[in-house]
Amino acid sequence: MESFDIAVIGAGAAGMMCAAVAGQQGRRVALIDHAPRLAEKIRISGGGRCNFTNLHAGPANYLSSNPHFCRSALARYTPRDFLALLRQHRVTWHEKHRGQLFCDQSSEAIIDVLRAECDAGGVTWRRPLPVEAVSHADGAGFTLATPQGTIRARALVIATGGLSIPKIGATDFAYRIAKQFGHKLIDTRPALVPLTFAHDDWAPYAALSGVSLEVRIATGERKTGGTFDEDLLFTHRGLSGPGVLQISSYWQPGQPVRVNLLPEREAEAELIDAKGATKRQIGNLLAEWMPARLAHLWLEAQQVPLDARLADLPDKTLRRIGEGLAQWTLTPTGTEGYKKAEVTRGGVDTRELSSATMMSQRVPGLYFIGEAVDVTGWLGGYNFQWAWASGVAAGEAAAEWTAAVGQGQGSGEG
């Protein structure tokens, strides 16, 4: 039997950050993970460059049934704090788009930083090692059963993430542990994921696979939905691209998606104006405003000849074309699922966790962090920033709590 102050299950972004912080505060920490490769989700993120944070990360960039929960952790560990850590390790970065920061090196640089920080805290690595069962006894802490023996710890941090990308090891472990100890779960579903459509409905657009353009895309009601100006990508089965991934976190089954294909133009008015100012064909004009393949297919769907001159088309027809371009409305039938989802929406209900420490209000010494909890960030580095912030909050809190328990002063409050 091995004994530690803190056991962290899940050696991903949140787990490694948590273990490093707690270890560097003098606590004996075991970091346990079942996967043969370390931090695979970090490794594949951002096309191998790791979009590790966003300069603008704040509570408004996160979805949760308890929307104020993330405020405390995000305020206490900011993107600039993580950048300071990267400077210490001589990792360089660049801003790619709207505050999104990527490594100049590969994603391995971020993994190396976290590994080094864990080693600096004397963290004991136990991987690959599955945890088969977890038990808890008041005054005795937690007992973890593994194929290599029993591990005991005063505090336990669950950092095993959600259900997204099962091929790299995602499981429902965090949710099973939460339910075991009486925690409620917010229904989980794929998020930051491509949307799909019925085969027959999508057949006219399948030929556009690979076409992309910047759009304004929205779904849901004004107060509860999302609107983004981002790229949209046509696929064989539906829609993808940053804009679609963003609204997928807000989309509910049965809801339509609204797309303005020309957000920088007043399409209806400009078509009417062009009618009296040019003798051009409408197909050529629209091909200047948007990808030609999309322009041509759009006109065919409207039963408007590509070679029709603007001057020969009725105003009513031009208004219909312009209005359709600005208000294309379609209803997905589903998503590409967890296999293509970047994150999982939902998870452990944060109403039963301390927003300052991530500790369970039901079980003293039990913490949930990262993607396992009901906090889902936008696309663009926000989910990594939540991993860093929640990991630091739990690492600091668990270190303090276990020190107090060791002195016989632990109250069990988060």
Image (cartoon, rainbow, N blue to C red):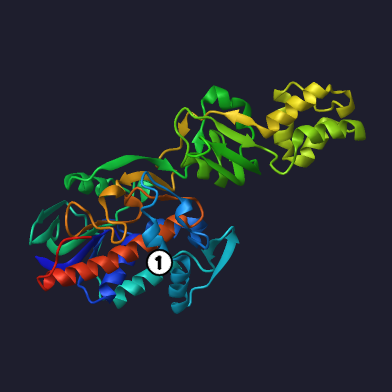
**Residue 84 as seen in the image, left or right of residue 414:** right
Q: Is residue 12 shown above or below 112? A: above
**Residue 357 as seen in the image, left or right of residue 308:** left
**What residue appears at the point 59 percent right and 61 percent down from the top-left corner?**
96
Residue 93 picture location, percent across and down: 54, 69
Label 1 sits on a secondary structure element that is loop
**What residue appears at the point 50 percent right and 57 percent down from the top-left corner?**
46
**Residue 65 as seen in the image, left or right of residue 277:** left
Three-letter code, disc 1: Tyr
Quarter of the image where the C terminus is located: bottom left
Q: Would residue 279 be seen by someone viewing this image from the given angle?
A: no
**What residue appears at the point 25 percent right and 43 percent down from the top-left corner?**
184
Q: Which of 23 and 224 is in front in this view?
A: 224
Residue 369 picture location, percent across and down: 31, 56
Total labels drawn: 1
**What residue appears at the point 12 percent right and 70 percent down from the top-left corner?**
409
Q: Residues within 10 Å of mark 1 (few under 14, many from 20)?
A: some
Residue 252 picture location, percent across and down: 45, 33
**Residue 111 as seen in the image, left or right of residue 242:** left
Residue 323 sits in quarter: top right
Q: Nearer the viewer, residue 104 or 190?
A: 190
Q: Is residue 108 shown above or below 275? A: below
Residue 319 sits in quarter: top right
Residue 189 picture location, percent across and down: 38, 39
Residue at the spot of label 1:
77
Q: Would residue 255 be seen by someone viewing this image from the given angle?
A: yes
Q: Is residue 330 shown above or below 213? A: above
Quarter of the image where the N terminus is located: bottom left
